[in-house]
Image (cartoon, rainbow, N blue to C red):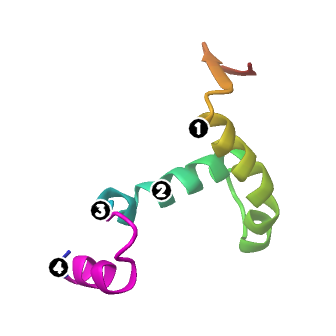
Amino acid sequence: MVLLVKAHHEYYSQIPLIPWMHGTEPCEHFFGVARQINPDFSFAEIIQMLPKISQYTKALRNKKLNFEKGKVFLT
């Protein structure tokens, strides 16, 4: 953590340090979405899924997805 603070101060001093963004949670969410699309994927397939994953996460951030009893609706 100390090295993260030092590197951030040296190279990204104009950007606020957000330590929780340097953990594994974003990776876990990314692969969780990938597994929702295709439970057993290869590296080539995940590269092809990138646009879908990007659109899905963008819709979640913008609150354009509505979850209702296991179904997903666009609003």
The segment highlighted magenta reads 3-17
Q: Toward which corner of the image does residue 11 lie, by quadrant?
A: bottom left
Identified by mark 2, the residue type is Pro
Q: Which residue is mark 1?
A: 61
Is residue 7 magenta-colored? yes
Q: Quadrant of the N terminus?
A: bottom left
Identified by mark 4, the residue type is Val
Measure the C-alpha gap from mark 4 to mark 1.
Answer: 31 Å
Measure the C-alpha gap from mark 1 to mark 3.
Answer: 20 Å
Give the main secondary structure, helix, strand or loop, of the magenta stretch: helix
Mark 2 neighbour class, 10 Å CA radius: few under 14, some 14 to 19, many 20 or more: few
Identified by mark 1, the residue type is Arg
| Residue 48 spot, x, y in % from top left | 82, 63
Mark 1 neighbour class, 10 Å CA radius: few under 14, some 14 to 19, many 20 or more: few
Measure the C-alpha gap from mark 4 to mark 3.
Answer: 11 Å
Q: Are marks 2 and 1 in contact (CB under 8 Å)?
A: no
Q: Depth check: 6 or 24 in front?
A: 6
Q: Secondary structure at mark 1?
A: helix
Q: Which residue is mark 3?
A: 19
Mark 3 neighbour class, 10 Å CA radius: few under 14, some 14 to 19, many 20 or more: few
Q: Quadrant of the C terminus?
A: top right
Q: Are marks 4 and 1 in contact (CB under 8 Å)?
A: no
Query: Mark 4 vs mark 2: which is more N-terminal?
Result: 4
Query: Mark 3 vs mark 2: which is more N-terminal?
Result: 3
Measure the C-alpha gap from mark 3 to mark 2.
Answer: 12 Å
Residue 57 in view of the camera: yes
Residue 48 position (above or below residue 37): below
Q: Secondary structure at mark 2?
A: helix
Q: Which residue is mark 4?
A: 2
Identify the mark at residue 26; answer none if there is no mark.
2
| Residue 51 spot, x, y in % from top left | 79, 55
Query: Mark 4 vs mark 3: which is more N-terminal?
Result: 4
